[in-house]
């Protein structure tokens, strides 16, 4: 199917939204980047796309914008996406977002059941690209035993006590550190607490810790139900980060005071483009009559022009838009990330960047050690 230019609104002119708008405009689409902040729009302004002041939390204003658009991409905090998705359905606008929030995705799935437009939440990196990789890994085995998915978006040079810099949404980060996490354990879907299940991971000589965070599996627990014994997603950080976050969120009870937690992170962990994204997916199962293990290790380094988390999140989202426009995804209703075939995903213009700009490969070596003191 030939892709024709579309009228696309991108809501949210932050670090990710502006890159998504640029990528879509480069493909010839008529793009409008919208945000409630005129100063934010001024900082993100480009000759490649138009800008418009629109408050994404004001549903009537969103509907007015979407009434003249074919597609909307929300790069806004998760808590405004229910209203944006509702406006998209009412205006007949296909919808994409970056949310990691489980409750928001469940709402979008519900309205998608009776929608004539496509609703594609959880685009980006994790959930997003990692779910496409995880589904592909699962398909490689005759009988599947285990799939482990690990993703880290980290500063290349950690300099603060948190050993972390905020490279995307502060609200999304706090959300995934606070909410229960879906996994499959011993064949059954269960919920486990965030910031637990700590493991030691060494990839290419660098030591990380991995721990439970919410939302990274997307809809894979449902998709692989009955097909896998153990399925998990964990976030990679430098060692010691999880214990500090538990002290802040639980010991000091800042999980109940997210505004204070937001101020702390904005002050202590400023944005950086000197970042790195690490992806590690491993699968174990029966293949050709014997038990085998396969792994994928990918690494992306940020540049002064484009951070690694900006590249991977924006490219993951735009690749899904490309697949939809080419007819390789369902054209209406709720669309899962794993509805995309990995080969198709990587053949898009945006998806190809995730191959061409990666320093990793399937042959990369990884040493994985579970710390039994913190096992689920």
Image: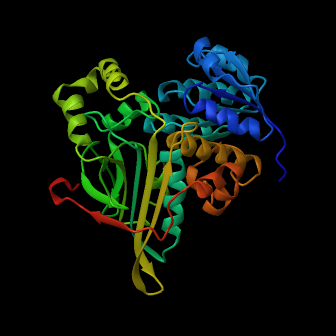
**Residue positioned 71% across, 51% down in the render:** 349
> Residue 154 lies in what quarter of the image?
top left
**Residue positioned 36% across, 48% down in the render:** 182
Q: Residue furthest bottom?
A: 289
Report the colour scheme. Answer: rainbow
Tell whether 282 sits left or right of 37: left
Q: Is residue 117 visible in the rendered structure shown here?
A: no
The C terminus - image quarter: bottom left
Between 21 and 96, the one lying in front of the other is 21
On the image, the x and y values in percent for residue 237 come to 33, 46
On the image, the x and y values in percent for residue 35 come to 61, 19
Question: Measured along the vertical axis of the image, is residue 164 above or below residue 149?
Answer: above
Tell whether 72 sits left or right of 3: left
**Residue positioned 43% across, 47% down in the render:** 216
User: How many numbered marks are there?
Assistant: 0
On the image, the x and y values in percent for residue 33 come to 68, 24
Q: Is residue 238 visible in the rendered structure shown here?
A: yes
On the image, the x and y values in percent for residue 369 come to 25, 63
């Amino acid at each position: 199917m030939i892709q024709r230019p579309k009228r696309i609104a991108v809501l949210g002119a932050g670090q990710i939204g502006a890159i998504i708008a640029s990528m879509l405009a480069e493909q010839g689409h008529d793009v409008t980047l919208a945000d409630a902040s005129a100063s934010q729009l001024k900082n993100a302004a480009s000759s490649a796309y138009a800008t418009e002041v629109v408050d994404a939390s004001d549903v009537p204003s969103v509907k007015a914008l979407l009434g003249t658009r074919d597609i909307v991409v929300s790069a806004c905090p998760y808590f405004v996406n229910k209203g944006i998705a509702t406006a998209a359905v009412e205006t007949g606008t296909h919808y994409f977002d970056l949310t990691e929030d489980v409750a928001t995705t469940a709402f979008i799935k519900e309205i998608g059941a009776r929608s004539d437009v496509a609703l594609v939440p959880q685009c980006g990196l994790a959930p997003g690209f990692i779910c496409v990789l995880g589904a592909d890994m699962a398909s490689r085995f005759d009988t599947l035993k285990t799939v482990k998915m690990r993703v880290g978006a980290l500063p290349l040079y950690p300099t603060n006590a948190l050993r972390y810099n905020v490279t995307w949404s502060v609200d999304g980060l706090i959300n995934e550190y606070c909410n229960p996490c879906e996994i499959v354990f011993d064949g059954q879907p269960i919920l486990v607490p965030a910031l637990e299940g700590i493991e030691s991971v060494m990839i290419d000589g660098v030591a990380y810790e991995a721990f439970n965070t919410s939302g990274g599996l997307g809809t894979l627990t449902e998709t692989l139900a009955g097909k896998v014994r153990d399925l998990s997603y964990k976030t990679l950080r430098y060692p010691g980060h999880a214990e500090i976050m538990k002290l802040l969120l639980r010991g000091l009870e800042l999980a109940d005071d997210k505004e204070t937690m937001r101020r702390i992170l904005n002050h202590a962990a400023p944005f950086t483009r000197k970042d790195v994204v690490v992806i590690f997916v491993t699968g174990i199962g029966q293949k050709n009559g014997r038990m085998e293990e396969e792994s994928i290790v990918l690494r992306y380094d940020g540049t002064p022009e484009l951070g690694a988390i900006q590249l991977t999140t924006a490219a993951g989202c735009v690749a899904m838009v490309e697949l939809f426009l080419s007819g390789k995804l369902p054209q209406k209703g709720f669309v899962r990330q794993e509805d995309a075939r990995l080969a198709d995903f990587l053949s898009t213009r945006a998806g190809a960047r995730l191959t061409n700009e990666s320093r990793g490969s399937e042959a990369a070596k990884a040493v994985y050690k579970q710390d039994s003191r913190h096992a689920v």
